[in-house]
Amino acid sequence: MRVFFVPGWNNRNRSASTGQMSLKTVDIQATTQEAFTERMKVHEPRVRQVCAKFARCPDDADDLVLETFVEAYQKLYQLRDPDAFGSWVRQIALNICRS
């Protein structure tokens, strides 16, 4: 099983004057990354199944899986119900595969 780690440091929580992130922001982002990584590990096989149905070869499926999780991480703020993460991320995979 392949698991991709998606690092995500954004500029929204940086100080305008110094450009540095607060310790609290770093802790929250680290926690979010760890939680996302754990959910990724759980749901990656199902996302891979969806992508494999659309891909022409395993390498293309890998690219689609990675693209799915990158987009999911970037849009994590849109997830309304954390319990629906699996269906939400599979829907993102479907949308990516269809485009």
Image: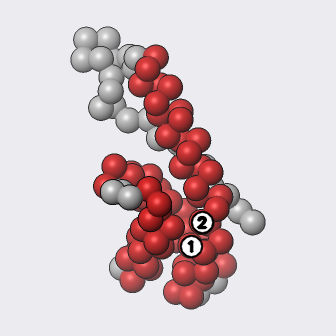
- Location of residue 3 by image quarter: bottom right
Q: Which amino acid does the dot numbered 1 rest on?
A: Val
User: Is 73 displayed left or right of 4 in the figure?
Assistant: left
Residue 60: percent from the left, percent from the top? 58, 76
Q: Residue farthest to the right?
A: 1
Q: Which amino acid does the dot numbered 2 rest on?
A: His
Check if mark 2's residue and mark 1's residue have beta carbons within 8 Å. yes
Quarter of the image with the C terminus in it: bottom left
Residue 33: percent from the left, percent from the top? 53, 41
Number of the label disc, if any, that sits on residue 43: 2
Residue 81: percent from the left, percent from the top? 38, 58
Q: Residue farthest to the top?
A: 18
Quarter of the image with the N terminus in it: bottom right
Please tell me which residue is depicted at 60% across the width and 66% down the height of the picture.
43
In this rendering, the answer to whether 44 lies above or below 61 is above
Number of the label disc, if any, that sits on residue 47: 1
Mark 1: which secondary structure? helix
Q: Residues within 10 Å of mark 1 (few under 14, many from 20)?
A: many
Please tell me which residue is depicted at 43% across the width and 79% down the height of the picture.
94
Mark 2: which secondary structure? helix
Pick the residue in front: 88 or 96: 88
Pick the residue in front: 7 or 43: 43
Residue 75: percent from the left, percent from the top? 35, 54
Residue 89 visible (yes or no): no
User: Is 67 displayed left or right of 61 in the figure?
Assistant: left
In this rendering, the answer to whether 60 lies above or below 1 is below
Q: Residue farthest to the left?
A: 16
Please tell me which residue is depicted at 65% across the width and 58% down the height of the picture.
41
